[in-house]
Image: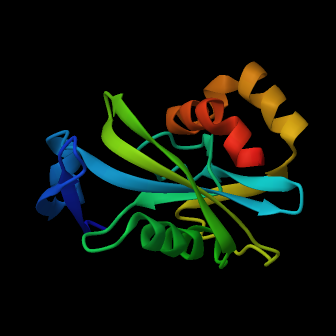
Amino acid sequence: MDEFIDVINEKEEITATKKKSFVHKNHLLHRISCVFVFKGNEFYIQKRSMLKRLFPGRYTFSASGHVKSGETTLQGIKRELQEELGIKASGFGYVGKLRIRHPEENIIAYIYKAKSNQKIKLRKTEVRSAVLVSNVEINRLVKTEKNTFSPVFIKSYIKFKNKIWA
């Protein structure tokens, strides 16, 4: 779906509203939101659908996605969580943000954590699978299987690991 998203500048001020395809084609700076959803002492990682434009079949956050025009980053991640995993979460906490310049993306990623005990219901066009991982397990995977994760996940996890698990 070619939704409208806000183009921002380095000060995070909205400078325009454009279709997502135009923003990507022109490598314009925009916002995404990402969340680590905990169930007890573990959090979900999802394996992206093979239909995704970027990093298909790779593991990433519990949910993530573009912030639609007019949404806050928190509203955006709550919507994405319902779209991708079919759940609502509570106890949202802001973890931090990352500026990512990648050949395929030009973004500021806003990272959150939350909790949910709801049963997930995957939207297969978005998510191939989702699994719960422990602190020990994700630390091992990030070191030994780095290339099976999206680059934004790896950078975020390494930078904010202590805040994610706090």
Q: Which color scheme is applied? A: rainbow
Residue at (60% x, 40% y) in the render: 58
Q: Where is residue 43 in the image (x, y as percent from the top left)?
A: 78, 54
Location of the N terminus (image quadrant) = bottom left
Residue at (33% x, 53% y) in the render: 31
How many marks the image carries: the answer is 0
Taking the image as shown, residue 88 lies to the left or right of residue 26, namely right
Taking the image as shown, residue 40 lies to the left or right of residue 9, namely right
Residue at (14% x, 41% y) in the render: 26
Q: Where is residue 126 in the image (x, y as percent from the top left)?
A: 53, 61
Check the image and name the residue furthest to the left.
Answer: 16
Residue 4 or 53: which is nearer the viewer?
Answer: 4
Picture quadrant where residue 71 is located: bottom left
Residue at (37% x, 69% y) in the render: 72
Picture quadrant where residue 150 is located: top right
Taking the image as shown, residue 4 lies to the left or right of residue 148, namely left
Q: Where is residue 135 in the image (x, y as percent from the top left)?
A: 85, 40
Taking the image as shown, residue 122 lies to the left or right of residue 144, namely left
